[in-house]
Image (cartoon, helix red, strand yellow):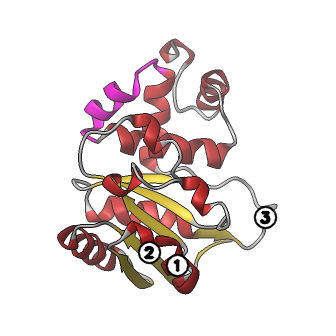
Amino acid sequence: MKHLRDIIKIAVADSSLIMRLGVSATIKRASDTNVQIIEIPDLADLINKIDIFKPHILIVSSTFGFQLQLSDLRNYPNLKKILLVSSLIDPKMAECYDATINIYDSTEHIHNIIDSLMTYDENETEAEEQLSQREKEIICEVVKGKTNKEIAEHFNLSVFTILTHRRNISKKLQIHSSTALAIYAIANKLVSISDVK
């Protein structure tokens, strides 16, 4: 059975007070669980704060992300890392993170990202995690041969949000190729054979 943790500890790292306060307020509004938030304004103090606070999730702004070496966080293998995107960045930068959120994302979307990262399995042998409706829709677009940019435009989402959904789909299904994803989509009647490109 899937459960959320009783208390979710989140560290928000950004040099801008307005960004930190805005992200913290949005997370509190988005969460239906007990959330504790620490704000980290200085990259130099990041590791020290993580050692003391022991967060489950670290939200790092893209401005910090350029300077942060994720190898510095290798001693925290269970720490989930979210990149907060506030401007155009190289999509490859987002690949090192567990998820991305955008300053334009809805409260509901941010809640879903945190929820998916903090859900854990009581029984590791349980059947695969259920896909959300949005993830099923994205699978359909992927097997139809659409690019991440085209899918983002179709759903009026950012490319980074689509990348996050695709990472979640891969984790849930343990499928890492387009061919295997197409087979899954056909077998589960998400698409017909004629839809596959």
Q: Which mark is residue 129?
A: none
Amino acid identity at mark 1? Asn
**Residue 30 shows in the view:** yes
**Residue 6 shows in the view:** no
Instruction: Check the image and report above or below for 10 versus 182.
Output: below
Expressed as whole percent of the image width and height from the top left, the position of residue 7 reads 52, 86
Circle 1 is placed at which residue position? 48
Give the quadrant of residue 80.
bottom right
Callout 1 touching callout 3 (CB < 8 Å): no
Seen from the viewer's position, the closer of residues 179 and 86 is 86
- What residue appears at the point 30 percent right and 76 percent down from the top-left corner? 24
Amino acid identity at mark 3? Glu
Seen from the viewer's position, the closer of residues 31 and 192 is 31
Q: Could you say whether the residue bearing mark 1 is in a helix, strand or loop?
A: helix
Expressed as whole percent of the image width and height from the top left, the position of residue 27 reads 33, 73
Q: Could you say whether the residue bearing mark 3 is in a helix, strand or loop?
A: loop
Amino acid identity at mark 2? Asp
- Gap between marks 1 and 2 measured at Cα: 5 Å
Report the side of 154 relative to 174 (left or right). Answer: left
Callout 1 touching callout 2 (CB < 8 Å): yes
Circle 2 is placed at which residue position? 45
Instruction: Check the image and report above or below for 182 versus 82.
Output: above
- What residue appears at the point 46 percent right and 35 percent down from the top-left corner? 92
Magenta segment includes 124: no
- Gap between marks 1 and 3 measured at Cα: 32 Å
Q: Could you say whether the residue bearing mark 2 is in a helix, strand or loop?
A: helix
Q: Which numbered disc, 3 or 2, marks the residue closer to the eye?
A: 2
Expressed as whole percent of the image width and height from the top left, the position of residue 191 reads 51, 26
The magenta stretch is 144-157
Circle 3 is placed at which residue position? 124
